[in-house]
Amino acid sequence: MYADLHIHSTFSDGTDAPGELIELAAARGIRAIAIADHDSVRGVAEALKRLPHPSVSLIPAIEISTVCNRRLLHMLGYCIDIANPALGAFIARISAEKTENTRVNFERARELGVISYDWERVLELHPDQPRLSGVHVADAMERDGAAALDMSLRELFRRFFLPTGAEFIETETTTAYDAIDIIRAAGGIPVVAHPKSIGDDDVVLNLIDAGVEGLEVYHPSHLPVERGKYRRMAVSRGLLVTGSSDWHGKNSSPDTPHIGCTGLDSGDYPILKRGRA
């Protein structure tokens, strides 16, 4: 694979450090990557210290996490200015929102007797993580050998910390339209991440009308028919096409066996000509 434009580091919910991601990409023959951590650019800043690299270039990126109709709606921002003050303030706010949402749903699980674990322990085990999600709750419990009642930690995560979960309580206020605005304010290119996950193509079309400039066509969760559909949508609306493995290291989904399993197959895609470091 030539390019993998959506991978995660230890600065969000991945398990590989930014330098390790660069070396993993090099070992796979990947020529361009985008570290797109959830609501964070710290992984990009760390990766930039490792450049220039003899075979791998980097597109500065972020994945802004929002919820729409109780489903994940993630917006990728490419070629952003990671030092933009407005972006920094936005990240601080949404990170605090996400952490509070995670705490609320954690306490919901405690109230229902599903877990008997302490929120302070989650904080203690992730002292440098300003944005805590259900991934960090599961990680802390696993490290302490703690279990959930009558369910696996994976099921706990899905029921209490995913918007589609039966017990999930929605508290975050940031919208995908807010994400588009801040990405553009930071000089970036807003791209809808894995549009299949939104579950409503009318929402995708509305986002395009609101200023989205690209679609993540190639993603492990997209079947061939869905890749074709979103590619046609992108071409018909004059949008950029992107692709990725959505690699999270050991936290990756079963659809993602390794970095670069999905992505862009050549350097001919216009997104690759914009702002590589």
Image: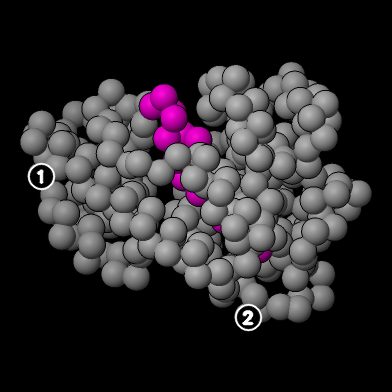
| Label 2 element class | loop
The amino acid at mark 2 is Lys
Nearest the viewer among 164 and 144 is 164
Which mark identifies residue 116? Answer: 1
Q: Determine whether 54 is above or below 208 in the image.
A: below
User: Residue at horizontal 28%, vertical 39%?
Assistant: 171
The amino acid at mark 1 is Ser
Residue 74 image point, x, y percent: 53, 41
12 lies left or right of 223: left
Mark 2 or 1: the one toward you:
2
Specify start and end residues of the magenta stretch as a single range.
60-74
268 lies left or right of 72: right
- The reply to whether residue 121 is visible in this rendering is yes
Nearest the viewer among 81 and 113 is 81
- The reply to whether residue 252 is visible in this rendering is no
Which mark identifies residue 190? Answer: none
Q: Residues within 10 Å of mark 1 (few under 14, many from 20)?
A: some
